[in-house]
Amino acid sequence: MPAASHPSPEEIVVYEKDPATKIATITLSRPERLNAPTSAARLRYAELLHRANIDDDVKVLVIRGLGQDFGSGVDLPEFMGALTGEDDGPRLAEYHLTPDDDVRLPPRDSFRGGAQLTQWFANSRGGCRSLQEFKKISIVEAKGYCYGWHFYQAADADLVIASEDTLFGHPAFRYVGWGPRMWAWAMTMGIRRFQEMVFTGRPFTAQEMYDCSFVNSVVPREELEEEVAKYAKACSLSRPVDAVVMQKSFFQTMKQFQGEYMGSIMSAMLESMGGAVRADGDDMMLGRDVYGSGLGQAVKVNDDQFPPEFRLSKSGRRQAQ
């Protein structure tokens, strides 16, 4: 798909703030594509978090998705098109560079070709791990699908409020085997439950995520916005911004003692060595199946092999009923 056909980053990632309450909102606004951010939109998301981090008018940030779902991950066709295309411009743009900057990228098939990108995802400017370094209070409003990149945000948020119909997970566990926020998910879900998600590839329901302490509150869909507003208001009234930043510094120090950032670097090493994985037979593979037929079709075909309650798609899960 040509780059010109994508909505602008400003259309996909919408930011609002209320200085009176000190509550800001980021709305992922691309419901026709399950709120998938383009690479440029992901970088805008990181920049908005940076601004909100500095802004004295912001104490609480709510992150939500427009439509029926929080989201199912980044715009993978757009992302992979930029990485594999002959034009280096989109690859440079990922790092806030242009062809005029006289920077030569490492070969795609080198270790650095993969490591550089996934280590960039561990950088707060990369738009994947950015919420982890946010010094204010963050709340994710989860509903419908919370997969892939959107699942990253849920892991890095301070609070997660979910509707009863939310499914959490990452399709990459089935077509790659890992994802950039592995350590954060293990920390927030508990290693035993997260291992189940990784090894089976199955998504977890909102209630299951509440039971393992990943989610703070689960409510019916029609009560979700009200529940999020209640939490946001309580957080905005609790302590001054200075005290909140002190609280966050304590929790961030604790997370680093537990190895959160180290886990991001380890995930980058896994990503960089992914090309060494050999299929046993008809295993779904990223290059052969996902790039060839498209992520949606490849995941759907693979999904049908699993027990209905282990399937990623809601339509596939409903077949069991």
Image (spheres, grey):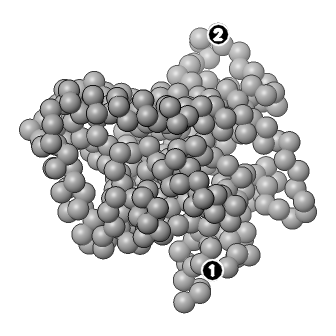
Q: Is residue 210 above or below residue 318?
A: above
Badge number at residue 233: none
Dot 2 or dot 1, earlier in sequence = 2
Furthest residue toward right: 281
Where does the image place residue 149, in percent across and percent down from the top left? 52, 48
**Residue assigned mark 1:** 308
At 46% across and 61% down in the image, what residue appears?
212
Q: Is residue 146 above or below residue 50?
A: below
At 42% across and 58% down in the image, what residue appears?
213
Give the residue type at disc 1: Pro
Q: Is residue 225 above or below residue 117?
A: below
Where does the image place residue 173, in percent across and percent down from the top left? 67, 56
Foreground pick, 70 / 270:
270
Q: Is residue 43 left or right of residue 192?
A: left
Quadrant of the rendered image containing residue 254: top left
CA neighbours of label 1 inside 10 A, class few (<14), some (14 to 19), many (20+): some
Please name which of the two marks, 2 or 1, marks the residue nearer to the observer: 1
**Residue assigned mark 2:** 102
User: Would residue 265 be visible to someone looking at this image?
Assistant: yes
Foreground pick, 178 / 64:
178
Quadrant of the rendered image containing residue 144: bottom left
* Label 2 close to label 1 by CB (< 8 Å): no
Give the residue type at disc 2: Asp
